[in-house]
Amino acid sequence: MTRDSNAKGEDVVHRALAGLNAIHGLISASLVEPDSAHVLDTVIGDRGVNLGPTAEGRTVAAGASDVIQVLDLMTASLGEPDELEDVIITLGRRHHLIMPLPTAGADGLIIVVTLDREHTNLALARVQLRALAPVLETMTSPGRVS
Amino acid sequence: MAAHPERLLELAAERATGALYLNGRWGGTVFLIDGRIGYVESVLTPGVEALLLRPTYGDEHGWAELVAGLRRGETAPAITAAGQLIRSSVSAVDTEILRRTALADAALATLGAAVPEAARTRTRFRPGEKHWCETLCTFAVPDVLAEVNRRKTVLGRLTLGVAPRRAVRRVPKLPIERIRLTATQWNIARSADGSTTPLDLAWLLGHGVFATTVAVHQLARLGVVTTDPDLPESSAARLVPARHAMSFLHASIAESDENLCAPESQQP
């Protein structure tokens, strides 16, 4: 995607997210900053049509960010401290999967995956999604060496 | 917002590469590569160097000193330190994610501000100039402007007087008996002393200004912070009504409705 002739590297964020292309029935997967509902990157899967950064993608990102905000509030209000692992929203034709990456980005990111229910295996998709987390969740901390 | 997008769109059409300097108090720099946006820098918002360096500072005082320098435009020491971090211990994915976060935040400050007519902003384009942080991905100008507009819509919907440049302070007494905060919320509440604005808090935390403003609004809604400097202790005990909940989704739907209605409403 880069046109910088001096750029040495490829778009590593997009490449990492593109690992989700292996999920059967993938419509789209986005990396989103839930504090701002900003879509950082999107990949389009085998069941999706690439229309660029569409209104639909932004709507899903906005809705997912709201969901995370509400669930964080709920989790924080429960007696025992606990963490949100993922959210599965099941519609008639689609699944929306949201997975928080609490230590990614400036203050946590989420991955939002939209799947075609007829062509997907939800359990497998969750496993594939979870496998991606460590790639994006590398953390900067004092003295950390990778 | 008159002069900026026009010059920017011209340069985009010419597929220009270089730095567009937007002068004036709300100024910033847009780095273009082949007519696409590689990075946006603003003195108002923490740049990628600040976002990269923040987690490496355990010492609040040292961080405050660095921030004070950055906000005066003294970026050289931070850029050197951030460059070392990129070469040694931060992954390319991390760097690129923070770069995009900083870009969008600076774009709002640089391209989204309503520039007063009186402050005639001059623009200057330096061909060939590049940002120090390697550009792995560029963005189409209309896409960046769309994100700027989305953020403006969200800010316009914030209630309780919350705005990026309006000071907030902790309430003297919580409106409810018990509340649990995230680390970020606690850090905001801790630093909200009545002189700090969401913009200041973003620099302190090393987060985006827009994201921090939204987080401050959430805390104002919970009754933890307030923008009212004269709020008496007793009235802090009021619970904030649910209608003050900010929803990105509602803002997004409202924005697309406005866009649909706009051409019609401009008809004579």
Image: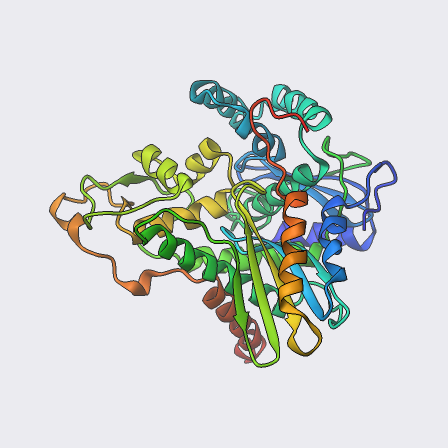
**In front of the other: B222 or B243:** B222
Residue B162 appears in the picture as rendered: no
Residue A18 located left or right of residue B225? right
Residue B177: image location, x then y, percent: 18, 48
Q: Where is residue A61 in the image (x, y as percent from the top left)?
A: 57, 61
**Among the 4 quarters of the image, the one containing residue B128:** top right
Q: Name the quarter where the C terminus of chain A is drawn.
A: top right
Give the image quarter of residue A111.
bottom right
Q: Is residue A137 visible?
A: yes
Instruction: Say which of B203 and A92 sits in front.
Output: A92
Specify the farthest residue to the right.
A5
Residue at 27 percent across and 47 percent down: it is: B179
Tell me what residue is drawn at x 60 percent, y 35 percent. A139
Q: Nearer the viewer, residue B189 or B145?
A: B189
Residue at left offset 31%, top offset 65%: B243
Q: Residue at x 51, y 45 (%)?
A: B118
